[in-house]
Image: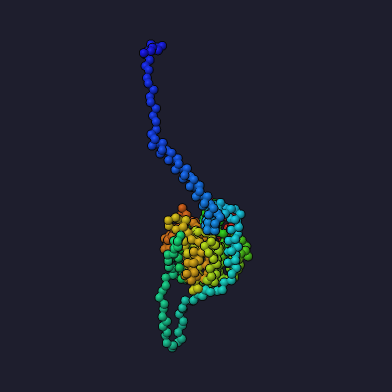
Amino acid sequence: MSVNLSGNPQVQTAAAPSKKKPASSKRRSSSLVTLFFYTMAALFLFSMLFSLWFFLTETGSNIRFMMADTLITTQHRDWAKYLIGSDELDRRVQRYWAQFDRYSAIQDKGLVHIERKPTATPTPTGAAAVTVPVPPKQDLVEMEPISGPNFKGQLLIIHDPKKLRIAVPGKVGKGEKVSSMVQRLGAIAGVNAGGFVDPEWMGNGFQPTGLVMSGGKVFYNDGGMNTPNHMVGIDKDGRMIAGKYSPNELIKMGVQEAVTFAPKFIVNGVGQIKNQADGWGIAPRTCMAQTEDGTILFAIVDGRQPGYSIGATLFDIQKIFLEHGAVTAANMDGGSSTVLVKDNKIINKPSSEYGERYLPTAWLVFDEPEKANIKNIWEGLDPSKIDPSKW
């Protein structure tokens, strides 16, 4: 025993033996590290092989350009440059517009023949009465489900094209939901129509792009009377028109209802889009067509909803229209604007996270379209002074 300075005994204790990790724990740790490095190496190798396939092979490039085209039709157009580069993005957009102009330049051969409804003919005095058999009444509006590998939607069939009107918002300052237009104006059904100025993709839906005609009158025009626009409309005889026309030309042609959008992609019964790669990407779609007897077809396809419906290309829609006998077809505004309303119910599933969008125009179907109280909400307004971002 030793004595410390304080006088207290100092106890000598043996050092505690060190604890060694079991060999099994070391092996487990080593195995995890090895697994991690193998996993990273595999991922690196996979990324390299994927990049080579994605950028250097024909199949990969086709998918890459399809993805870029899909982005071009969304609010994230600039993201496409990460797939194809800024220069290629600009070239691709310009190429599409050049294609649209070529489609519009094809002369319509007038294949639509709308039969007039039979009317009562006065019977001459003393002549025997003639009984004319009356055909069974056909519903004005029908719906048919449509689908493909990546999409689901509805085909809205309207048997009398003269029952269609272009409707516009009821109040100055912002657009209106199609369901609201249908209810306010007493329509049977409605779909979204033309495009609109949409700053930061959060616009109020009040300012259309190009031209709007309703009831044979110009409601809105952001250019001159001789300025051509890509138009989709219906003339006084119920024939669908699609192509590049000025307001003066449309008036001379007797066009009653029209909005600006593109492209026209079926002309004289011939599809202009040759394959999926030229189908302008995968997206929600609203497209319009007409068959030889005058029947109007609207294809409304949902999209951007994995597990339900991703969307369709214009080539997909063209195929559906041709199978139903379309001789003319054109694209309408799509994406988050795509909506179908019937009997005051939204039939499809709009892709916008906020639901139905506020829009400047809609195609509405009426039993008596001449009685529809559609007023020119832009009358007296200067298009250059409209603020499309102000709610």
**Count of all numbered marks drawn on residues in the image:** 0
Q: Nearer the viewer, residue 160 or 147?
A: 147
Percent coordinates x, y for residue 189 in the rendering: 45, 64
Say which quadrant the N terminus sits in. Answer: top left
In the image, farthest residue toward the bottom: 126
Q: Nearer the viewer, residue 372 or 353?
A: 353
Percent coordinates x, y for residue 152 in the rendering: 44, 61
The quadrant in which residue 306 appears is bottom left
Question: At 60% across and 65% down in the image, what residue appears?
Answer: 101
- In the rendered view, tell whether residue 12 sits above or below residue 390: above
Residue 262 in view in this figure: yes
Q: Nearer the viewer, residue 119 or 88?
A: 88
Residue 168 in view in this figure: no
Question: At 49% across and 62% down in the image, what residue appears?
Answer: 286
In the image, farthest residue toward the front: 23
Percent coordinates x, y for residue 5 in the rendering: 41, 11
Image coloring type:
rainbow
Percent coordinates x, y for residue 344 in the rendering: 42, 61
Question: At 48% across and 45% down in the image, what residue appears?
Answer: 40
Q: Is residue 246 left or right of residue 136?
A: right
Question: At 58% across and 66% down in the image, what residue appears?
Answer: 103
Q: Nearer the viewer, residue 344 or 33?
A: 33
